[in-house]
Image: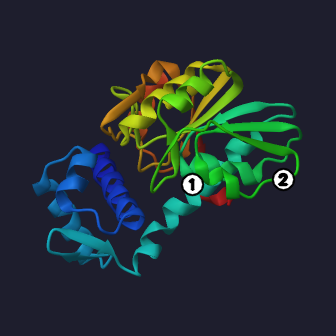
Amino acid sequence: MKRERAYVEGRRHQVLEMLQRNPQVRVDELAKRLGVSVVTLRRDLQFLEEKKQIRRFYGGASVSKDADGYMDDVAVYRDLIARYAATLVEDGDTIFINTSRNALNMVKYITSRHVTVITNNGKAISQERAAGVDIILTGGEVRHPKEALVGDFAIRNLQNVYAKKAFVGCSGVSAKAGVTTEIANEVNVNELMIEHATQEVYLLADHTKIGHNSSFTSCGIEMVKNLITDETAPEEELELMRMQGVNVYQVRRSDY
């Protein structure tokens, strides 16, 4: 029951995030991206509307001004995850970061010197960072609204590139389905970054992503040896991951 509640809560957070990124997205498209029925999605929208988080209209919905309060806890945990991930970067490291907003956020907290970040996140161009951190973009076809760099060009550029560590975000992760994403075009890039990390792969996923399965699998859980999440992640799912050899670190709000 606890695991089911966490799954539903995570899905509703994702609904809010999708609506914030694309206010014009339709109900049927939201349901397809989340892998649920339209009926289930409409129940989620009804719940969020009753909580004054969204406003519904024919065929879709938009985020209300009150939604910021609902997202505060998630935002705090994501920031804590980014801060902790940044402490794992050492002087001279070359690291991969995928299109994850949370993973990119860690860049501004990196204090190590002579660090090279290789990423397919086009938003890295304007990301705040220290003087000792250099950014290399993979290149590729730009996909909005995430400004993800994907396609054959990005793949070719990554095929002969290796990094010490990979810091990867996701749409969902579970012991059964592994690391999943909503965007099919990002799968191949994610796979290469994970496979070409010579030392460690770190998955950054707040509690809304734990136990949630999205549409496309980037890799099985056996490829991820380190998970950075938060204290409210469902313990049952975390224990299943630990049984698969995943090291789990949970940030706590008291650390903020």
Label 1 Cα neighbours within 10 Å, binned few <14 / some 14-19 / many ≥20:
many
Q: Which residue is mark 1?
A: 78
Question: Label 1 sits on what residue type?
Answer: Arg
* Residue 159 point in image, percent of width and height: 59, 19
Comparing 239 with 178, the one in front is: 178
**Taking the image as drawn, is residue 81 in sight?**
no
Residue plotted at (54% across, 38% down)? 140
Q: CA distance from mark 1 to mark 2?
A: 20 Å
Q: Quadrant of residue 217?
A: top left
Q: Position of residue 207 (x, y in %)?
A: 45, 48
**SS at badge 1:** helix
Up/down of 220 relative to 151, above or below: above
Q: Quadrant of residue 98?
A: top right
Name the residue: 45% across, 36% down.
Answer: 186
Instruction: Quarter of the image for the C terminus: give it.
Output: bottom right
Mark 2, residues whose alpha carbon is within 10 Å: few (<14), some, or many (≥20)? some
Q: How is the image coloured?
A: rainbow
Label 1–label 2 contact, CB within 8 A: no
Q: Secondary structure at mark 2?
A: loop
Name the residue: 38% across, 27% down: 175
Which of these two is toward me, 82 or 29? 29
Where is mark 2, residue-wise? Answer: 130
Q: Nearer the viewer, mark 1 or mark 2?
A: 2
Image location (x, y in percent) of residue 161: 67, 22
Which residue is at the far left? 39
**Which mark is first along the chain, 2 or 1?**
1
Say whether residue 3 is left or right of residue 235.
left
Residue 235: x and y in percent read: 43, 39
Whether residue 131 is visible: yes
Left or right of 71? Residue 59 is left
The part of the image, by quadrant, that contains residue 95 is top right
**Mark sitting on residue 3:** none
